[in-house]
Image: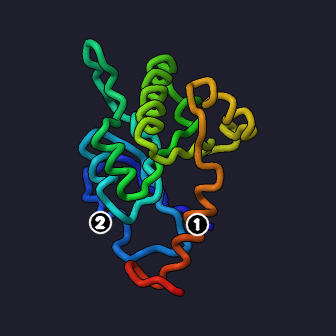
Amino acid sequence: MDIICCEGNENKVEISKRVPNMFIREKLVIIEGGDDEWNRKVLESKNVDILLDPHQGFRRDKIYQKDSGLNEVLCQLAKENDIAIGFSLSLILNTKDRAELFGRIIQNIELCQKYKVKIVIGTFAKNKNELRNFKDVEALFKILGLRNYEKDFVKKRLEFKKKFIRKGVREE
């Protein structure tokens, strides 16, 4: 299984240029979150499978609300386009302000569960030092309020994509 992973909005390139236009059958498309405009473009695209860490990037909290990168409208877009929201342990391990990050993750988990958006968790490690046992990752996210998540999302998604010859045409 191959994964196409595009990083956030460093160059502000249109998402249609970063993600191939053709329907990808054997690969999973994962895009890292960024600011609100970037997250919306990702969730409006039909070629994306997972939006990873939408709370990433520079955010300014308001007086009574955290700016977590997700809101009701974006959750409904994710549900309509069948895009899962991913949370990575790698970002938690490499951040300086974990308390603020935990608050944003908790808020995003609550929004995803309220609007029934699929949730994916994992280490998404960039080096060997970030690898952890999956039971440890699962326990951490249960502490943060995650009740249920899509355990076999990758397998189910790839099986679903292999049913299509190309976008819009399905094998019987």
User: Within 10 angstroms of label 2, few (less than 14), some, or many (20 or more) residues?
Assistant: few
Asked if residue 156 is positioned above or below residue 140 in the image, the reply reads: below
Asked if residue 74 is positioned above or below residue 109 in the image, the reply reads: below
For this view, does 14 lie left or right of residue 22? left
Quarter residue 166 falls in: bottom left
Q: Residue 148, position in %: x, y?
A: 60, 39
Q: How is the image coloured?
A: rainbow
Residue at left offset 41%, top offset 84%: 169
Secondary structure found at label 2: helix
Residue at left offset 72%, top offset 40%: 134
Count numbered badges in the picture: 2
Asked if residue 91 is positioned above or below residue 81 in the image, the reply reads: above
Secondary structure found at label 1: strand
For this view, does 96 lie left or right of residue 115? right
Tag 1 residue: 2
Residue at left offset 69%, top offset 37%: 129
Q: Amino acid at mark 1?
A: Asp
Q: Amino acid at mark 2?
A: Lys
Q: Earlier in the sequence, mark 2 or mark 1?
A: 1
Q: Nearer the viewer, residue 117 or 42?
A: 117
| Residues at marks 2 and 1, CA–CA distance in whole angstroms | 19 Å
User: Within 10 angstroms of label 1, few (less than 14), some, or many (20 or more) residues?
Assistant: few
Tag 2 residue: 17
**Residue lying furthest top:** 63
Q: Residue 67, position in %: x, y?
A: 32, 26
Q: Residue 82, position in %: x, y?
A: 42, 57
Q: Nearer the viewer, residue 79 or 123?
A: 79
Quarter residue 158 falls in: bottom right
Q: Nearer the viewer, residue 142 or 33?
A: 142
Residue at left offset 35%, top offset 64%: 46
Q: Residue 4, position in %: x, y?
A: 49, 62
